[in-house]
Image (cartoon, rainbow, N blue to C red):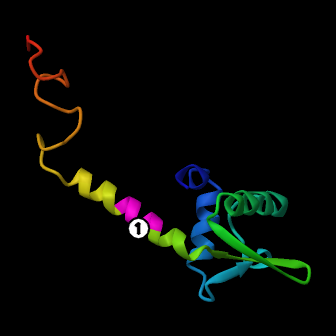
Amino acid sequence: MFTALGDPVRLPLFSEIASHPAGEACVCEISDVGVSQPTVSHRLTKLRAAGLLLSERRGTWVCYRVCPTVLAGLAGALTGVRDTAARPAGTMTGTARAGGGKPPGYPVR
């Protein structure tokens, strides 16, 4: 999910569709992302292939909307990142321990 959104063109496209007043946007409504129309269509196809967007053909246009489960998944993932970043120093779990990550009983120099 984050790999697909890591592209500097795909993220603004995703954001524009997600924040569109109708909840969806046709290709003809997406503008000002700084690339040509074929590039926009290609990037939208990549977002759809990643499962981030749903599409529906209407005549000659394709309309896109954000997959309903994606925003919840993004929110959950980002909440986890925020919670981890908010921990006080020295309370991390896993391999981060006193002694630079060495296993218990290993002599610390």
In-front residue for pair 14/56: 56
Report the span colored magenta. Answer: 73-78
Residue at image position (17%, 51%) is 87
* Principal secondary structure, stretch drawn in magenta: helix
Horizontal and vertical percent position of residue 82: 29, 58
* Residue under numbered circle 1: 75
Horizontal side of residue 90 vs 26, given as left or right: left
Horizontal and vertical percent position of residue 31: 72, 71
As helix, strand or loop, the secondary structure at mark 1 comes to helix
- Above or below residue 4? Residue 61 is below
- Above or below residue 101? Residue 82 is below
Q: Quadrant of residue 37?
A: bottom right
Residue at image position (64%, 66%) is 13
Horizontal and vertical percent position of residue 24: 66, 82
Judge whether residue 74 is colored magenta: yes
In-front residue for pair 69/85: 69
- For badge 1, the amino acid type reads Ala
Residue at image position (45%, 71%) is 72
Horizontal side of residue 14 vs 37, given as left or right: left
Labels in figure, total = 1
